Image (spheres, grey):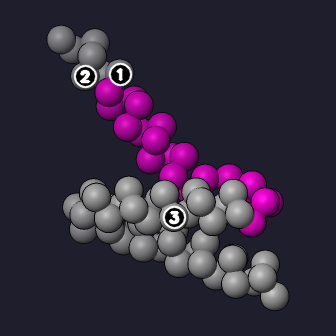
Amino acid sequence: MLDSVLAKELDEAERKALDSLARYKFQMFGYWAAIWVHLNRIEGKSRPSPFKGLVRAARELKSANETVK
């Protein structure tokens, strides 16, 4: 039962994080992303991060901006 509750909470945190980001609510994105990470650790199944693609894109943009300077 606890697993299903955690799974629901993880899904909700992911949904809210992405919704916040889509609405330019960066602080709320960080809040919900951190909640997702915390719940993922508690669950112990170590799900892959749903934010990995976003992190990769941010690193690519950062790298591209550094080479332009």
- Where's the C terminus, which quadrant? top left
Tag 2, which secondary structure? helix
- Which residue bears the numbered disc 2? 65
Q: Residue furthest bottom?
A: 1
Residue 22 visible (yes or no): no
C-alpha span from label 1 to label 3: 28 Å
- Please name the amino acid that badge 1 sits on: Ser
- Which residue bears the numbered disc 3? 35
Tag 3, which secondary structure? helix
Q: Residue furthest left?
A: 69
Left or right position of 32 against 22: right
**Residue 56 part of the magenta-drawn span:** yes
- Please name the amino acid that badge 3 sits on: Ile
User: Residue 63, which numbered label?
Assistant: 1
Numbered range of the magenta stretch: 43-62
Tag 1, which secondary structure? helix
Left or right position of 1 against 18: right
In the rendered image, the vertical position of residue 32 relative to residue 60, given as above or below = below
Q: Main secondary structure of the magenta part?
A: helix
Where residue 21 appears, x then y in whole percent?
Answer: 32, 62
Q: Residues within 10 Å of mark 1 (few under 14, many from 20)?
A: few
Residue at 51%, 64% (x, y): give it: 35
C-alpha span from label 2 to label 1: 5 Å
Give the number of the mark in front: 2 or 3.
3
Q: Residues within 10 Å of mark 3 (few under 14, many from 20)?
A: some
Where residue 23 appears, x then y in whole percent?
Answer: 24, 68
Left or right position of 5 against 45: left
- Please name the amino acid that badge 2 sits on: Asn
In the rendered image, the vertical position of residue 19 relative to residue 31, given as above or below = below
Where residue 64 appears, x then y in whole percent?
Answer: 31, 22
Q: Residues within 10 Å of mark 2 (few under 14, many from 20)?
A: few
- Where's the N terminus, which quadrant? bottom right
